[in-house]
Image: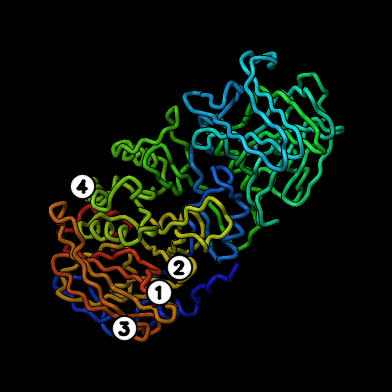
Amino acid sequence: MSQPPPRFRRRTVLAAAGGLAVVGVAGPAGLALSSGTAPTPPALGRRPISMAMHIHASFSEGIASYAAHLDQARRNDVDVIWWTDHDFRVAAHDHRRMVHFDGAEELEGGLAWTWQASTEGRLTASAADFVDSPHATDDPAKALRLTAAGAGILWYAGKAWNWTHTGNISDTTLHLDVLPETSGPDALLLVEIALSYHPARAGQHILRYRIGAGRAGHRTEGLVGTVDLPAPPGQWRRHTLPLVADVRRLWPDLVAGDNSLRGLRLGLSVTGSARGSFVVDRLAFDRARRAGQAGEELRAEVLRAYDGAYPGVTHHRAYEVSMVRHLNWFGGDQTLPAFPSPPYRDNDVTRTERMIEFLHSHGGVVCWNHPLDVESRESLARLMVERNNLGADLVEIGRGPLDDHLWALDVAARNAVFFTAVGVTDDHDGTDWRGRGDRHITYVWASSTARDDLVAALRAGQAWFTDLARYRGALDIEVDGRTAMGAVAATDAPELTVRLLATDLPSGASLEAVVGTVDLAGVRDLNPATRTTRISRRQLRQGWYDLRITPGDGTYVRTQVRGRDGALLGVSNPAWLLPGRQTHDIPPLRRF
């Protein structure tokens, strides 16, 4: 893996914050802009803090462990991770409880479980048949018979609808009824669990049970851990598979609970031209600690195992609320919302607004995730303008297609719809943050990495996002020597100077000032009304540039960094300059 780009230098930021003079002209009721005085730093003790704000680990459906993401944050010099596991997956809501082996597809609560066969090696014969008899004594329908001959493995992989068999294994025990018909040292039944990716061995771990082995035992070979379980031929036996206990015994250096049951498959392994036959029935998923709020308590317990393990990386629990248009919820009391059964996502706008109201009633801020997944940019902008962004505090703007998301941001800014634009990682793998298409991290100006300080900065719009791999500088906007990014300033000044901060621009990159009209055009003119000024790196003095603005009847300004190749590398949030008559109903933390 290549090394990450250096973070912006703290000395550069401090020098820039104490740079040039602010020059402006104020009208009778305008801002009291100073002349000839140096701007003050944004606030005592504030500093740029980088955050990965959309991250999924072992309580979600991907292969990532918490350790994998913590390792990526350390490698990429990211200060904070927000754990946005899907809420209904944390609770294992309507996740698979039982498989009866009644056919290649079977339903539970209206949700399908499906099997898919494959082979490896050199099998001379293989078959997977659902039979009426024999079957387990307390599961009276059908069972699955696996037969194979030769040298290889017949695999039968199972999967629940929308990965609802996956999720963290911390409280999960499997039970499987097995009847060995033709078995021995050369014919064994395999139960294989694909676990999570861990950086210690740079791979996804595999837990494999061999049923029918001569004696019990545990052994590891790299990423594969094997548990041998004896099984008397010709007799049904219910095998209990305590996943966490076995992972802990096989890999004592791992946090055993930090694993997802990512994949599950059965296999019949034969060697030396042997012939084998096993019948299996009644696969049960026993999750002991997921009722109500218990899933969140379990997640907190797993995460506590990493306390102090990654110095320099702070991590906070959050949620991706998933049964409406997806919402990330930062801060608050982490109360899980009610879930529908079955757990189908409902994109109804009103339901999403009601969910945002519920989350606000429990504290924190709410982000509208991947807003273009069910909208065009025009329909998205219409919702932002007509329905006040559904009440969301933040929107994932820093993701592909970036131009379309920024277009919607500018339409909203033109109409004085105030929200904070943030960047997106949305990583489920934990293997290479820098190699992803969506790799925008979010920075905030805050005094610490404490949760409440970060939430307050997000609420105020004191944030910008950058391409993790290509730009790690600081952005800010000042008016009258004070930070104005994200803020709404009331001014009747005919002209004033806005100071733009952009540190550590890469070679060949430039700063762009996007200045837009705030005329509250609404849906009658659903377009941005902007002009862009390009500022070369040479024009920045200690990272600062003074831009003359004519606020008129309302203006906003935001900045963006464009690379030598034309790609956007960083984007700030806007600052609004509005006449006093337009500044009613401004959120308190956005008042300049």
Dots 2, 1 in contact, CB < 8 A: yes
Question: Of residues 16 and 261, which is closer to you in this image?
Answer: 261
Residue type at the position of mark 2 = Arg
Local crowd size for mark 3, using a 10 Å CA cut-off: few (<14), some (14–19), many (≥20)? some
Q: Which residue is mark 1?
A: 41
Q: Which mark is residue 46?
A: 2
The residues bearing labels 2 and 4 have C-alpha atoms spaced at a distance of 35 Å
Please tell me which residue is depicted at 41% across the width and 37% down the height of the picture.
323
Q: Is residue 524 above or below residue 323?
A: below
Residue type at the position of mark 1 = Pro
Q: Is residue 435 above or below residue 147?
A: below
Q: Which residue is mark 4?
A: 386
| Closer mark to the observer between disc 4 and disc 3 | 4
The residues bearing labels 2 and 3 have C-alpha atoms spaced at a distance of 21 Å
Residue type at the position of mark 4 = Glu
Local crowd size for mark 4, using a 10 Å CA cut-off: few (<14), some (14–19), many (≥20)? some
